[in-house]
Image (cartoon, rainbow, N blue to C red):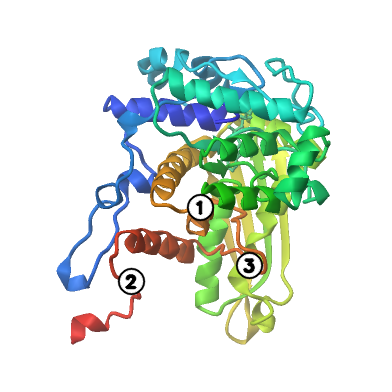
Amino acid sequence: MPGMGAVATTLIAGVELVKKGLGEPVGSLTQLGTVWLGKRTENRVPKIKDFVPLSGMEDLVFGGWDAFPDNAYEAAIAAGVLIKEHLNAVRDELLKVRPMPAVFDPRYVAKLDGTHVKDYGSLREATEKVRQDIRAFKEENGLERAVMVNCASTEAYAQPQKAHFSPEEFEKALDRSDPSISPAMVYAYAAIMEDVPYANGAPSLAADIPALVDLANERGVPVAGKDFKTGQTLMKTIVAPGLKARMLGLEGWYSTNILGNRDGEVLEDPESLKSKEVSKLGVMDTILQPEKNPKLYGNISHLVKINYYPPRGDAKEGWDSIDIFGWLGYPMQIKINFLARDSILAAPIVLDLALFLDLAQRAGMSGMQEWLSFYFKSPMSAPGLYPEHDLFIQQMKLKNRLRAMKGEDLITHLGLDCYE
Ligand SMILES: NC(=O)c1ccc[n+]([C@@H]2O[C@H](COP(=O)([O-])OP(=O)(O)OC[C@H]3O[C@@H](n4cnc5c(N)ncnc54)[C@H](O)[C@@H]3O)[C@@H](O)[C@H]2O)c1
């Protein structure tokens, strides 16, 4: 994991606690989820982990990079997500996880003054060093395979530029250390070149540029992203499909959040904030399809605000004030007040992505993995296709993909088979 802060350490500590029988992997589809197979009368509902050959938690070893030298125990204490009792139960395991020096560029994360950073002349050299780190990590730990999940701070907002459009342009840009290549892209490139599947949990532009998607396809490496779908956006993509299903109208959706962790601090920088806000705003259009339902969804005010508020730490709070209308246009309101815990919601996503991407690679899948949209606020999709945001369609895609992998019938929910 590039970025060993709150999310990464909550994942590592959690997996170690589960391995010791001191916790349950709540929120993880790979550990707790089931998949329905065949006709309803057959009653075949295996656990996902028994249905497809996922690696077990006992096979996992964690490592990564950070711009600060704290080991995973120190970083977890600083993040303040898990209680001391939990952290002390896995202290030895966490102390061993020491981040490698980061590829860091203050132009991309203005709020941090990274001290644990690599020395490199060109960006090409930076990629070589990360690739070397990956190889050394695998060797030292006796690993057959690895997966990279980006858990680093949100970078400044960026849009694809010339250097991002083809692998050839990207390679040239690395040689001349083009400033449009961000650290997140350096890690993603290194992963793909080492045949390591890659997922982007941050809203930063990384493997979602055409150059890296093409490279991933060429090399047969699966990639997915971006921006973990946790708190408020998770709620939005649960509630909005419900309103749409019942053809209830929407006039406006005002979302505001406070959070006090380092992620929140980084988001105080307007450029990093923009990456996050763009990612959060994108979800509504594809769910509601305003062009197909202009009377219901043609004129929505959608506002998203994020404020850094230190007293809350990782225990963020989100408010949604939703103005809807029903029969004959009569107005109604819904209020959601979600007292969430950012990293508690994100950790199982990192675990699932690592296990599913590893499975995808072994199943011969490469390039963009749309079936993993379920986990992201800004899912990647093929050019010309809109990304799917509806959590329930995303879930169907994911489970149908697993069924297809194993040669099982896809579930249509037609239900007629039981009446034949
Ligand atoms: N927790 C959630 O619910 C959630 C949801 C969606 C997305 N995310 C994203 O996940 C990422 C991690 O979140 P977090 O709460 O763990 O943040 P965090 O600030 O606790 O951890 C991020 C870590 O990345 C490190 N870092 C910064 N630049 C780096 C670089 N170039 N290379 C290596 N390390 C670098 C920082 O030093 C820090 O330790 C953020 O981008 C956040 O936006 C989190």
Whether pointer 3 and pointer 1 mark residues with C-beta atoms closer than 8 Å, the reply is no
Give the mark, 3 or 1, whose residue is nearer the N terminus.
Answer: 1
Residue bearing the label numbered 2: 411
Q: Where, by quadrant of the figure, is residue 244 drawn?
A: bottom right
Q: Name the element at disc 3.
A: loop
**Kind of residue indicated by mark 2:** Ile
Position of residue 155 relative to residue 116, above or below, is below
**From the viewer's perspective, is 94 left or right of 250?**
left
- Where in the figure is residue 57, as x and y percent of width and height? 33, 33
Q: Give the residue furthest to the left.
A: 42
- Residue 12: mark in rendering: none
- Residue 386: mark in rendering: 3
Give the mark, 2 or 1, whose residue is nearer the N terminus.
Answer: 1
Instruction: Answer with the quadrant where ligand 1 appears in the image.
Output: top right
- Residue 366: mark in rendering: 1
Q: Nearer the viewer, residue 295 or 330?
A: 295
Q: Quadrant of the C terminus?
A: bottom left
Query: Which mark's residue is nearer the viewer, 2 or 1?
Result: 1
Q: Where, by quadrant of the figure, is residue 330 drawn?
A: bottom right
- Where in the figure is residue 90, as x and y percent of width and height? 38, 18
- Where in the figure is residue 378, as x and y percent of width and height? 62, 54
